[in-house]
Amino acid sequence: DRFDLTLACMEGLAFQTRLILDDFAQAGIPVQRIKVIGGATRSPSWMGILQAVCGIPLDILEISNAASLGAAAIAGVGCSLFSDYTEAAVKMTAKTRTLPVISTDQVFYHHKYQNFKDHLSVSGYSGNGGS
């Protein structure tokens, strides 16, 4: 049904994100937190799944249209309102809230993630995925 399909999409995206995080960690660049923007941040279910799968805090930018903010920052640098993109980001960053790592779903999703990686290896996935 639609619920199962939606859940599968959210979990698949979270698992793909975790693969990227695992690859970064294996390359010696551990990611300590993820900054999340956009419409999906309004879904507590989606943010909970992403946090449970990735196992690190999520910093959720509370802004309704992040793309517009980015365009405004670029324009601000272009017309010398800001000296560089770092200054624009600091001055234009909206409030964030942090979803900490306290999810009881982490053990559940750890097993599902391992199954996901097992299926990828059978299908010929060539990425590291932290293995």
Image (cartoon, rainbow, N blue to C red):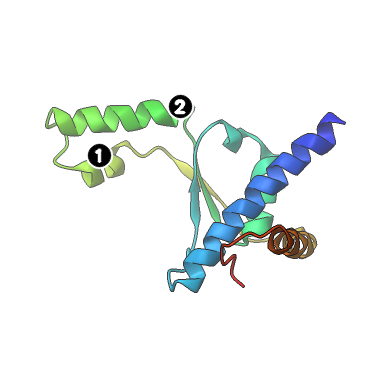
The front one of 29 and 39 is 29
In the rendered structure, which disc, 2 or 1, sits on the residue that comes first in sequence? Answer: 2
The front one of 23 and 11 is 23
Q: Residues within 10 Å of mark 1 (few under 14, many from 20)?
A: many
Q: Amino acid at mark 1?
A: Ala
Query: What residue do we see at 80% from left, 61% from top?
Result: 108
Q: SS for tag 1? A: helix
Say whether residue 91 is left or right of residue 109: left
Give the x, y percent position of residue 116. 73, 58
Query: What residue do we see at 47% from left, 43% from top?
Result: 96
The front one of 127 and 57 is 127
Report whether residue 68 is seen.
yes
Give the x, y percent position of residue 93. 36, 39
Query: What residue do we see at 30% from left, 42% from top?
Result: 89
Give the x, y percent position of residue 5. 79, 36
Q: Which residue is mark 1?
A: 88
Q: Which circle marks residue 102 in the picture?
A: none
Give the x, y percent position of residue 81. 15, 31
Marks 2 and 1, how far apart in space? 16 Å
Report whether residue 48 is seen.
no
Say whether residue 62 is left or right of residue 83: right
Q: Which residue is mark 2?
A: 65
Q: Amino acid at mark 2?
A: Asn
Q: Quadrant of the N terminus?
A: top right
State whether residue 105 is above or below residue 65: below
Query: What residue do we see at 71% from left, 40% from top?
Result: 9
Q: Residues within 10 Å of mark 2 (few under 14, many from 20)?
A: few
Q: SS for tag 2? A: loop
